[in-house]
Image: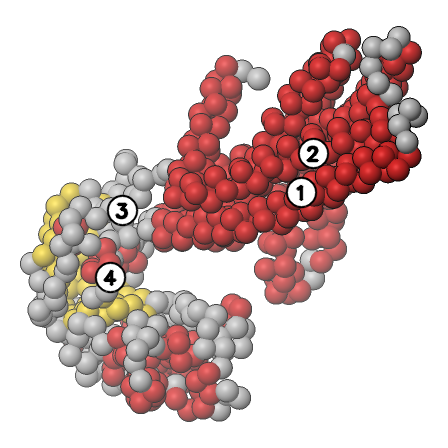
């Protein structure tokens, strides 16, 4: 591994540890209780074998009368019973603070991730898959739980148990004590060596597992395409090849893992016999009592069990730390679009001004250069597409999904970059080209921005949007759920629900992004009627591909090559045969549903 990779790993490790410590700080007293109970459990694990071996010493006291021996044995059994009950009590009790601690901490993690991710920009979500982000959040929360559990229940127990055990053995025999030290060092070294050998295969196996999961998800999500193109054999072949490679890597991982277990098991077995041999020799030389033979065996077994977890601990901790880095990198990535002030946008009239706006997605290629556009309060304008016009980008800038490079955009003389994003978007309403609905009831979708709206208001908005009739024909009416990817509703039904939502929002500024681009002429007439309702008394921007929807607009903006090339009403634009708008209208020769001359 290169020096750069080592430094990167150290930085990542510090980042993860710092974050986990930060998340644990509010729960210090819960952590303290958990540590206290864990210490009690470890202490009992050390003391119990001593009293178990005392039974052997007592039984071997042939010079004492049996009634007295029985009394002594019963006293030891009573102590063992108390230790066992205390052990069980402590093990159960440790979970109470742990449950609250981990639940509260992971809840904080989910809430932080939820808030922080939603504050990322449009570009961020364009570059990241939704299911991948959800998975990263779950992995961070799961990693935190894993690290806490391993530290309190295994690492802490090992740190307490092994040194104290070695100290107790040293009191009995220096020779056996040296053997225990040797065993701990050799056994630990074997675990670490094999962990480093298998780590690269585990990383590769995780990558292949992620790839297989991604291919499975991608294929299932696109089931419709798989069916349409009859490509199931091809998809199955791709998936099978990925699985085959994954299993080859897993086989290498498992093989080396088994070698580790074999080496560790052989070391433990040899040491167990060897330690008993020396204990017997020491007993034969009258250096130790007979009980030491059993005590050594009990401690060997318990230390072996403790040390055998080293590889699991390293593996689990390594995986938990690395799996948490993906989400932590997102949490440490500054938001592209940030609020510069706490000032709230206030709408008085709904006037919009694009003043000398210059914007580019990438540094060397501007989308807009010195764009000037003024929209009067209550004015309804349409933006018509021509090649290279980037018309949807204009709307994204208005919503401040991107920041412009130069000058400003004003709403009622307020610079949108100097007000909070929530207050800006809270004053704008949009009906998108592809209506996005939540997997919730139709009622909740219509009332999304106004969750406290009463039933009469929701029904009134639905009637204005021409969707009340088909909603009431559904089995559960307004309580019907919109299912995954909306397969239960047609596109125009979803579009009408989106329009009903905009009507209920009743905001001063409305944007409609190609709201009828995918409709047949009959469905378009219904949507057009609904659009007329929602646009009343509002400043409206309509992104149009089909010119049949915009004849009644106050002004039509024709954009080409990043610039506004035409800006008049429909009646004016249609008169000049050399203008782009007239040519576009001629291409769409199927005509208007409304009177062309209106």
Q: Earlier in the sequence, mark 3 or mark 1?
A: 1
Q: Is residue 169 above or below residue 439?
A: above
Residue at numbered disc 2: 45
Residue at numbered disc 3: 337
Asked where in the image residue 301 lies, by quadrant, the reply is top right
At label 4, counting other C-alpha atoms closer than 10 Å, the crowd grade (few under 14, some 14-19, many 20 or more) is some
Please indicate, yes or no, whether residue 82 appears anywhere in the rendered image.
yes
Q: Earlier in the sequence, mark 2 or mark 4?
A: 2
Q: Is residue 550 above or below residue 342?
A: below
Secondary structure beneath dot 1 equals helix
Residue at numbered disc 1: 87
Q: Disc 2 vs disc 4: which is toward the camera? A: 2
Q: Disc 3 vs disc 1: which is toward the camera? A: 1
Where does the N terminus fall, quadrant-wise? Answer: top right
Secondary structure beneath dot 3 equals loop
Q: How far across and how far down the image is residue 365, in percent?
A: 28, 39
Q: Are marks 4 and 1 in contact (CB under 8 Å)?
A: no
- Seen at 57% across and 40% down, the residue is 37
Where does the C terminus fall, quadrant-wise? Answer: bottom left
Q: Are marks 1 and 2 in contact (CB under 8 Å)?
A: yes
């Amino acid at each position: 591994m290169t020096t750069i990779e080592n430094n990167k790993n150290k930085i990542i490790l510090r980042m993860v540890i710092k974050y986990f410590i930060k998340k644990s700080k509010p729960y210090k007293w819960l952590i303290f209780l958990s540590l206290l109970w864990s210490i009690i459990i470890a202490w009992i694990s050390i003391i119990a074998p001593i009293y178990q071996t005392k039974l052997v010493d007592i039984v071997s006291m042939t010079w004492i009368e049996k009634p007295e021996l029985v009394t002594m044995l019963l006293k030891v059994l009573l102590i063992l019973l108390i230790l066992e009950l205390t052990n069980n009590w402590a093990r159960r009790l440790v979970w109470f603070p742990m449950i609250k601690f981990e639940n509260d901490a992971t809840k904080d993690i989910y809430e932080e991730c939820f808030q922080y991710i939603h504050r990322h920009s449009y570009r961020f979500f364009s570059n990241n898959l939704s299911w991948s982000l959800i998975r990263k959040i779950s992995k961070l929360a799961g990693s935190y739980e894993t690290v806490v559990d391993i530290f309190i229940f295994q690492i802490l127990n090992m740190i307490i148990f092994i040194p104290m055990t070695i100290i107790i053995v040293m009191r009995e025999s220096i020779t056996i004590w040296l053997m225990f030290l040797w065993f701990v060092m050799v056994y630990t070294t074997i675990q670490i060596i094999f962990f480093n050998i298998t780590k690269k295969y585990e990383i590769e196996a995780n990558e292949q597992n992620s790839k297989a999961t991604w291919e499975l998800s991608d294929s299932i999500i696109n089931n419709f395409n798989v069916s349409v193109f009859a490509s199931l054999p091809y998809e199955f072949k791709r998936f099978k090849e990925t699985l085959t490679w994954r299993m080859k890597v897993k086989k290498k991982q498992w093989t080396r893992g088994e070698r580790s277990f074999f080496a560790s098991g052989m070391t433990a077995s040899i040491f167990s016999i060897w330690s008993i041999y020396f204990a017997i020799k020491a007993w034969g030389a009258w250096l130790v009592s007979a009980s030491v033979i059993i005590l050594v065996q009990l401690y060997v077994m318990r230390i072996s069990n403790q040390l055998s977890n080293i590889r699991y601990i390293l593996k689990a901790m390594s995986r938990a730390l690395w799996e948490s880095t993906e989400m932590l990198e997102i949490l440490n990535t500054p938001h592209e679009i940030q609020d510069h002030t706490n000032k709230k946008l206030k709408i008085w009239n709904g006037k919009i001004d694009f003043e000398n706006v210059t914007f580019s997605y990438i540094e060397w290629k501007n989308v807009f250069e010195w764009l000037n556009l003024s929209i009067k309060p209550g004015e309804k304008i349409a933006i018509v597409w021509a090649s290279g016009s980037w018309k949807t980008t204009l709307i994204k800038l208005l919503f401040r999904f991107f920041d412009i490079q130069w000058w400003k955009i004003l709403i009622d003389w307020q610079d949108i970059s100097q007000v909070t994003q929530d207050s800006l978007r809270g004053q704008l309403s949009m009906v998108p080209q592809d209506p996005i609905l939540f997997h919730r009831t139709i009622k909740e979708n219509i009332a999304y921005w106004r969750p406290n709206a009463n039933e009469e208001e929701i029904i009134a908005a639905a009637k204005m949007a021409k969707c009340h009739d088909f909603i009431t024909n559904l089995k559960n009416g307004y309580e019907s759920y919109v299912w995954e990817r909306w397969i239960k509703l047609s596109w125009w039904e979803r579009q009408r629900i989106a329009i009903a939502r905009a009507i209920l929002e009743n905001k001063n500024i409305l944007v409609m992004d190609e709201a009828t681009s995918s409709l047949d002429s009959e469905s378009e007439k219904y949507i057009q009627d609904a659009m007329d309702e929602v646009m009343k008394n509002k400043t409206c921007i309509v992104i149009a591909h089909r010119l049949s929807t915009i004849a009644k607009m106050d002004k039509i903006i024709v954009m080409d090559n990043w610039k506004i090339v035409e800006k008049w009403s429909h009646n004016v634009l249609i008169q000049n045969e050399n203008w782009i708008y007239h040519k576009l209208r001629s291409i769409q020769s199927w005509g208007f549903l409304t009177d062309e001359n209106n």
